[in-house]
Amino acid sequence: MKNIFKIIMLLSIGLFLNSCYYDAYPEEEISTPDNDGGEVPTEVSFQIDIQPIFGKCVGCHGGNQNPNLTEGNAYSSLVPAYVKANDANGSKLFKKLNDGHQGGVSNDKLALIKAWINDGAKNN
Ligand code: HEC
């Protein structure tokens, strides 16, 4: 009889501690921004995230070869001729890099370009 009582006590304590443990979780999630751990930041910036990717392109796309990907010219050269806002798969820039044009770009960078286009291809 004594043993059964002990087991019930232990179970109750266990359940009690467990319930406290769970309470703590939702609060933590609220204070955590939803962009941590993701591959792509919630808002991709053309200036900060996309323009630097073209560093390896400007040797060829420095003005004579379209599109002109130099800083200050890349956006107007790309949109709308090579980038269809909100439609990465229908954009020549994305298709070209997806096909590995001149060595292409890393998957992370390709994902950034895709997110930027599908987020409206803003000049941000
Ligand atoms: C070694 C030179 C070279 C490099 C580096 C290069 N390109 Fe190109 N690119 C070309 C040439 C040449 C063409 C035209 C022939 C073709 O379509 O492949 C071209 C075509 C393109 C086109 C299509 C143009 C059109 O009017 O159809 C896009 C878009 C493009 N490049 C983007 C890029 C991007 C973005 C990068 C960097 C990640 C890059 N290129 C790197 C030489 C290069």
Image: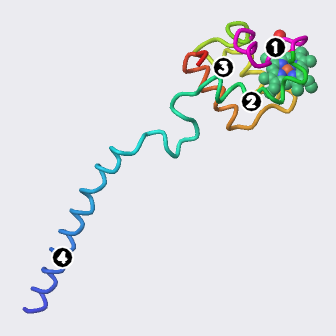
Front of the two marks 2 and 3: 2
Can you identify the residue that label 3 sits on? 89
Residue kind at label 1, given as amino acid type: Asn
Measured Cα–Cα span from mark 1 to mark 2: 13 Å
Can you identify the residue that label 4 sits on? 11
| Quarter of the image where the N terminus is located | bottom left
Local crowd size for mark 3, using a 10 Å CA cut-off: few (<14), some (14–19), many (≥20): some
Residue kind at label 2, given as amino acid type: Ile
Q: Secondary structure at mark 3?
A: helix
Measured Cα–Cα span from mark 4 to mark 1: 69 Å
**Mark 2: C-beta under 8 Å from nearest atom of ligand 1:** yes
The magenta-colored residue range is: 63-77
Instruction: Report the front residue among 87 and 48.
Output: 48
Can you identify the residue that label 1 sits on? 68
Front of the two marks 4 and 1: 1
Q: Residue at x 70, y 14 (%)?
A: 75
Q: Secondary structure at mark 2?
A: helix
Residue kind at label 4, given as amino acid type: Leu
Q: Position of residue 28 (x, y in %)?
A: 33, 51
Q: Is residue 68 magenta?
A: yes
Q: Secondary structure at mark 1?
A: loop
**Mark 3: C-beta under 8 Å from nearest atom of ligand 1:** no
